Amino acid sequence: MASSRPHDSGIESFDDFIQSIGCSRSDENHCLYSENARDGSPIVLILYVDDMLPFDQNAEEFADLVRQLRLKFAMKDLGSA
C-alpha cells in the first residue's frame, strides 16, 4: 500500500496517528510498528518512505486497521507484495 500526505494537511504525522490507535514503534527500527490483535496474533506494519507493508494473520483486524488509516491518509492499495 502506498500512503501519501494526510487528509488534514499534515497536522498529525503518520507516527503520531498510528501510535494514537494503539500501535507501538520499535525502538530498534523506527519504520516498524506493531500491536496485538484481540486474538493475540501480531499486527506488523513496515513503513518505507511512502510505502507501507502490513502483516496480519487476522483478516478482520487487518481490515479495521486499513479502514482507520484510510480515514486519515490518502492511500492506494498496490496489491500483494
Image: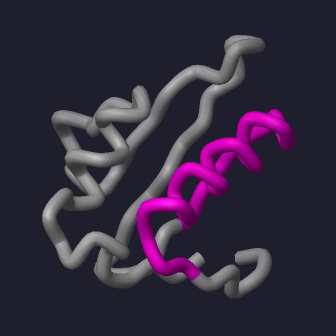
Question: What residue do we see at 61% from left, 84% from top?
Answer: 76
Q: Name the residue located 45 percent from the left edge and 35 percent from the top edge.
A: 34
**Magenta highlight on residue 64:** yes
Camera-nearest residue between 71 and 64: 71
**Quarter holding the N terminus?**
bottom right
- The quarter of the rendered structure image containing the C terminus is bottom right
Q: Nearer the viewer, residue 54 or 74?
A: 74
Which residue: 69% across, 13% down?
Answer: 40
Q: Position of residue 64 (x, y in %)?
A: 70, 43
* Residue 73 rendering spot, x and y as whole percentages: 43, 70
Residue 31 place in picture, x, y as percent? 29, 57
Q: Residue furthest front?
A: 8
Q: Is residue 48 above or below residue 36?
A: below
Q: Is residue 31 above or below residue 65?
A: below
**Prevailing SS of the magenta stretch:** helix
Give the residue displayed 65% in from the left and 49% down from the top: 55
Q: Position of residue 74 (x, y in %)?
A: 48, 79
User: Residue 51 falls in which quadrant of the image?
Assistant: bottom left
- Vertical arrangement, residue 10 with respect to residue 76, above or below: above
Q: In this picture, which residue range is highlighted in magenta?
A: 53-75
On the image, which quarter does residue 8 sit in?
A: bottom left
Is 54 left, or right, of 78 in this rendering? Answer: left
Residue 30 lies in the magenta stretch:
no
Task: Give the number of marks.
Answer: 0
Is 21 on the left or on the right of 16, as rendered?
right
Q: Left of 19 or right of it: where is 57?
A: right
